Image: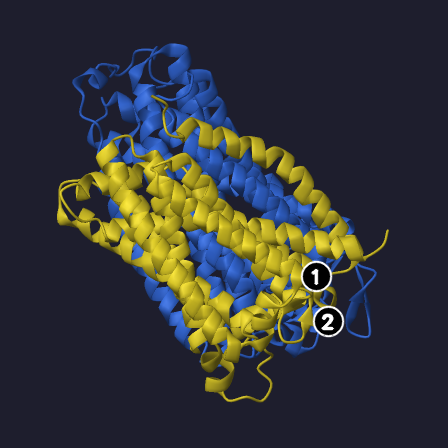
Chain colours: A yellow, B blue
Amino acid sequence: MAEWPLVELTAAAMVVSMAAYVLFGGADFGGGVWDLFARGPRAARQRALIADTIGPIWEANHVWLILVVVILFTGFPIAYARLSTALHIPLTLMLIGIVLRGSAFTFRAYDSRADDVQQRWSRLFAISSLVTPVLLGIAAGTVVAGGAAPPGRLSFHAAYIAPWTAPLPILVGLMTLTIFAFLAAVYLTVEAREADLATDFRRRAIASGIALTLLALATLWVARTAAPRLWEGLLLRPETRLIHVATALSSLGAFGALLGRRYRTARTFAALMAALIIVGWALVQYPYLVPPDLTVHEAAAPPITLALLVGALGVGGVILFPALWYLYRVFGPREG
Amino acid sequence: MSDLLAARSQMAMSLAFHIIFAVIGIGMPVLMVLAERRWQRTREPVYLELAKRWAKGTAILFAVGAVSGTVLSFELGLLWPGFMEFAGPIIGMPFSLEGFAFFMEAIFLGIYLYGWDRISEKAHLRAGILVALSGVLSGIFVVIANAWMNAPTGFTMVNGVPTDINPLKALQTPAAFSQTLHMTLAAFTSTGFGAAGVHALMLLRDATNRFHRRGLEIALTLAIPAALLQPLSGHHSAQHVAEHQPVKLAAMEALFETQAGAPLLIGGWPDEATGTVRYGIELPKVLSFMAFNDPTAVVRGLNEVPEADRPNVLLTHLSFQLMVALGSFMALVALVALWRMWRRDDLTHHRWFLRATVAAAPMGFIATEAGWMVTELGRQPWVVHGVLRTADAVTPMPGLVVPFLAFTALYILLAIATAWLLWRQILMAPAEAEWHRVHVPRGRPVVEGVRG
């Protein structure tokens, strides 16, 4: 068997898992953000809707992240070793956020509703939902900017702090947060069974969508000087240009559907847009897994490992997707 | 604190924390499914209440287990990039399989917890069974990866680089069977006695509470067979270690000199500097017999390897002794319970039995921790036995004491919060009067109390 399709297939499986994590796990974080910003006369109902929506599914959605990590360390062990060394600090902070978000949400769900301990869990859940996506995005942005280089003889600051505290990673962090919040708001317009509640989230979806557009433009502007390779990839290569046009069109579709209160359509477009952002990112970087120098081929495990991994993912998918479909069907918005 | 020691401490602490939740995540779904099945068969509401209570506990503990497991999947790289770069292609397979098992567990736990009134009774029970099955499976996959670290297979080292990699052969590491069996039984014993002990404690206060009677019965149904099989599985494990990791066995037994007809050491305080053991009882030739089924067999001692290649004998030996002692106590309690049940005796009439069960409640968890200390400390200084040293796998990132302290503080807070929540929300018994009717006066045969 030729080697190249295995590497590409493995990388594609990782990109798909990453996109799934953004679409599902990301939206759960976004839900926490809207819990934090619940305002107005319907604040309590907003919070209840968010809790009911993510309660049964957040743990399953979270597993996509584990899958990304597993594919990375099995399929691209050199990249995993390098990323987890260079991004030690932001990843550690993100993990603390993941731990606090998950446990605070569960503690809140099962604790008595009567006292202020409940409120404290609630606050902790919401704040960690806000901070964690930023750190995740910062880690991703550092990779994009080519900041995940081997530490070598650099000073501690130059090797472990400067790369992820640069403007580009921070902008990507904020963009990630905004994508998650936007997805959550759009999904919640569908989940809401009362029109007034749906309108609340419609307003939030539009606001976060505008913020996302502005952040995307700002990121692009900064990338022009901070990551010329990214800039070139984003705008100059024809195959990636197509993806970006599609991304822009789906975001327009989402806006249009939101304005027309066609929430299910808006959900489809929003999800498409988020998935295309991830796919676009992957294509811009290709063939580099860890820019500026480590390609997917250099980082790849031996073919036998990749073949078994792709096989396992395929078989796993056959079991996984029906199970996920069942989960979402059981807890999807009830018709009528 | 050196960076290596900080990294090892952080990994040990993270594993020690996660393992409690992992073990409960394997055992609790079994209890909850057993209770729900009885509810569907008998229509006694007390079983439904038990299933719901246990499910609530499972939900809280599973969430903490899921997030602390996520931390570990990152820590493998954050702390040991050298290890993962080496081992990822060889032993990543069971981790990816574990990913899917974990997916199934999370999906069907969500359905189980939130689906009581959304799906049919049959589908609900089926979801619970899938949670229990995938819990056991995901434990097995992770332990296979650890077994490989103890008995690595599926590659050849050429000039310090693994070549000829075969992940399928790695999956078949000879340590896999003994370790996964021992760990699965440990999960059932710990959770079974953990739950049994809690209900026994409540029965000591109020022997007539039907909720706790039923709880005790079901928990013992899980704990008794597991606790009785565990010594056999342990014996099998030890024979495997004797063959494949003689240095680990020597550290477990504090055997400093290679000898024929080696004695079994009970207790004792090994002194590595002098190579002697104080205060121990030696049973002549028993170790040779236990390890190789031959009282005159030669058992290799620590003197076979240079000092730099030896694990910490004191900690390995003490952990091993602790595990064996606690395991033996639980097996004894299980035997007594079995005997009493066979005699159709009401267990709640025996306050000493209830007290022994309460005492056993934390023992499974402590024994599990001690067992992991044995297998991990006993493998040092290697992270992959005989192939890669722990010191060569650690990250170059300095200042590792900071994340170690941060995670320690985080986990202490989480442990306190979890314990407090469980106590407040789950353990406080439901006080429905209906559940106070089954107390059987002393001396009469039990009809209601203890049946299979």
Tell me the SS state at disc 1: helix
Question: Which residue is found at the position 44% from the left and 24% from the top?
Answer: B34
Instruction: List x then y, in percent, for residue B113.
Output: 37, 31
Instruction: List x then y, in percent, for residue A234.
Output: 57, 66
Please say if B87 is above or below A189.
below
Residue tagged 1 = B246
- Contact check, label 1 and label 2, Cβ < 8 Å: yes
User: As rendered, which of B389 and A52 lies closer to the eye?
Assistant: A52
The N terminus of chain B lies in which quarter of the figure? Answer: bottom left
User: As rendered, which of A89 and B283 lies closer to the eye?
Assistant: A89
Answer left or right for B231 relative to B1. Answer: right
Tell me the SS state at disc 2: helix
Question: Which amino acid, mark 1?
Answer: Pro
Using the image, tell me which numbered label, if any, was put on residue B304: 2
Please say if B243 is above or below B191.
below
Query: Disc 2: which chain?
Result: B
Question: Which residue is found at the position 55% from the left and 51% from the top?
Answer: A246
Please say if B297 is above or below B259.
above
